[in-house]
Amino acid sequence: MWQKHKPHHMQRYMQQNPYRLLALSFLAVMTVGTLLLMLPIASTQGQGTTLVDAAFTAVSCVSVTGLTTVDTYYHWSLFGKIVMVILIQLGGLGIVCFTTIIAVLLGKRVGLKNRLLLSEDVGQDGMAGLLHVTKKLTIYTLAIECIGGILYAIQLHPYIGDDSLYIGFMQAISTFCNAGFIFFDNNLPYKMVGDVLFNINTIALIIIGGFGYLAAFDIWSHRKVRRFVDLKLHTKIMLVGTTILILLGTIIFLGVEWSNPKTFGSLPIWNKIMASLFQAITPRTAGIATVDYNALHPITLFVTIILMFIGAGPNSTGGGVKISTVAVTILASRTLFNNRPDTEIFERRISLVTVLKANGIIFLSLLLILIATCYLAWDEPYDFIRLLFEVTSAFGTVGLTTGITSDLSESSKWVLMLVMFTVLYGFDLGDLLFAILGMFSMKVAAYIQPFTDKLINKIKKGRGEGGKLLC
């Protein structure tokens, strides 16, 4: 008599992949943020902001990008800035993580479905100790943001007065989340190119936020031993990769821009070194600049594009394809050309599935960037490298710009918004990108899955299954 309730087809579609429900939740937050930023109270002039500008800002905040079509400091009122900070914090910490912490504080029970979403949101395999990790992640985030906010408030006070007491904490949240928004005058960082406190505080927040909490927790748990060999494979790759990118970026920036009169040319030697170090770190999805990127040499712009494409670490507030993904791809290429049977690093074998996944991420990322750049090149009058820079900045959720964002056409702005939303979760599964591009990846994957499983099983039987590496 009683029939068992069957879930609606949309509910079944969402349950097949938690990322779809996460995408819907972030889309809902972006929509609410857009509506709030369109209110007259959100602007300093007391007038409503256009839909495209409000939506662009909301998407940029939630995706912790930092690209903006209006001046953050002069256009948005205190209410508008508070809305932006909340969106940035939700995007950086994660909506499910944020709501879970609130539920725990209120004494609510976190069900299995919410735990599954939470594991996807924080990037942890399995649900063992998930709530404990979430609490640690929240405390870790808020503590660092508070320290950074205090330092910013002290450092910015001579420039903006008592406003630094709240702008400093807003800026700390933006910097730690690698959002790239500047809540004070955009020209002020150019004047602070040699300011040691500002540079160290900003660099520290960028690196800590983009390093990834799993790697940070691993280092902290080994703080007494302090032996590199005892760290997890992922942490080792992050340490080595981060160091290499920072050193190479600093050397290239210093060498190319040393005599450029519009950037480093007139600076003292120490300021040149500090500016080079800062510019090598900020493309790692932070988006704060102490020099005018519109005046950089094309070689420097191209190197910055590469750094933005690589991005930060997994389980971090940063974007890009991730350092570990690039590391796996390079190691797999070395294995191929050296005719070796296995891809290895630090005496650990990397599984074939991980290698295929890393190469797929790189391919899909390049495809998305090329499609978006081609559209902008067709629609805009600017140089191709500046358009590629803009698209890669949106893809890597960086926020750096050569100054053309506000002058783009509405259609180009919507394309950049689509890019920012597509890479909101990175390409850990690639499903979201396929869905947006209309490639029906799930149907294709379901068709070829039996064949790929047989192939992978044969290879595993022949030489053993490799270790697992989080990309």
Image: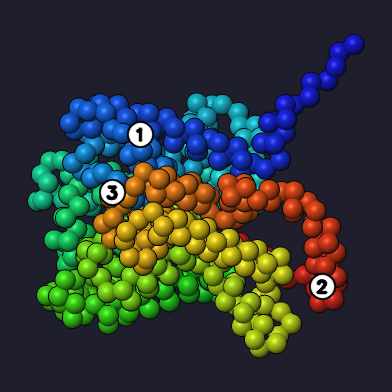
Q: Residue at x 44, y 48 (%)?
A: 415
CA separation in Å, label 3 and label 1? 14 Å
| Element marked by disc 1 | helix
CA separation in Å, label 3 and label 2? 52 Å
For residue 176, say whether it is visible: no
416 or 272, nearer to the observer: 416
The quarter of the displayed image where residue 37 is located? top left
Q: At label 1, which amino acid type do we have?
A: Leu
9 or 321, nearer to the observer: 9
Q: Work out which quarter of the rendered image holds the C terminus and state it.
A: bottom right
Residue marked by disc 3: 406
For residue 465, say whether it is visible: yes
Residue marked by disc 1: 51
Most distant residue in the right direction: 1
Q: Residues within 10 Å of mark 1 (few under 14, many from 20)?
A: few
Q: Work out which quarter of the rendered image holds the N terminus and state it.
A: top right
Q: Residue 442's mark?
A: none
Assess whether mark 1 and mark 2 are in contact (beta carbons under 8 angstroms).
no
- Residue 57: percent from left, percent from top: 35, 41
Residue marked by disc 2: 459
Question: Which of pointers 3 and 1 lies earlier in the amino acid sequence?
Answer: 1
Q: Residues within 10 Å of mark 2 (few under 14, many from 20)?
A: few
